[in-house]
Image (spheres, helix red, strand yellow):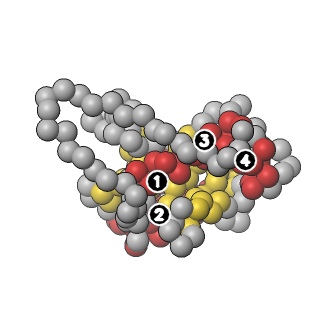
Amino acid sequence: MFFLNLNVALKSDGIMFRSTSGSDMEGSDLSDFVAKKDDDTILTIEVKKKTVLPIGNESSVEFFQKNSKAKCTMSQAFCYMIENSLLYGIISSYDHNWFLQRGGNNHNQILVSETLSFNNNNPTMLKAYAYIVLRAKQGHYLPNPNIVSVPNTTSEPRYFTRLVKRNQNQQ
């Protein structure tokens, strides 16, 4: 219902929210939902159950550093942003939302907002989503020089896995 309201609010800007599951985009390195402007994906939204992202009274930074499932979700959302050359993304448990932006000199850092609850009044969820989507519409593309596309020239499907390089001091 929430995305339906967003689709109505942003229709005049040519922006539509779509689920990637059960569609022609399934398996195309996209998160659960995407915001599209015409045929371009401008924003990814990774949705998890609130039991997966049970934030307490801690800050967003503490939550994503300490909670292993939250770390995994952040990594997943960040990978989707990189793979799709996007500047912005969202993580949502419906009740709580975090807005993401790639930052740093090489855009290899993730900036995360404080938690925005669904019942927040200033700004409302609708206004917050509309704001980040309109920002993404103005400038969403962020190329990543470390990703090289290799076209599939065979008739066989290709399967990809991700290799995450860890620092020596990480466990």
Amino acid type of the residue that numbered disc 3 sits on in the rendered structure: Thr
Label 4 or label 1, whichever lies nearer to me, is: 4
* Secondary structure state at the residue bearing disc 1: helix
Give the spatial CA distance, label 2 vs label 3. Answer: 17 Å
Q: Which mark is on residue 81?
A: 1
* 135 or 108: nearer the viewer: 108
Q: Which mark is on residue 102?
A: none
Q: Which mark is on residue 73?
A: 3
Residue 123 sits in quarter: bottom right
Amino acid type of the residue that numbered disc 1 sits on in the rendered structure: Met
Give the spatial CA distance, label 4 vs label 2. Answer: 29 Å
Circles 2 and 3 in contact, beta carbons < 8 Å: no
State which tag comes first along the sequence, 1 or 3. Answer: 3
Q: Position of residue 131 (x, y in %)?
A: 53, 67
Q: Residues within 10 Å of mark 2 (few under 14, many from 20)?
A: many
Circles 2 and 1 in contact, beta carbons < 8 Å: yes
Q: Which mark is on residue 169?
A: 4
Give the spatial CA distance, label 3 vs label 4. Answer: 21 Å
The residue that mark 2 highlights is 87
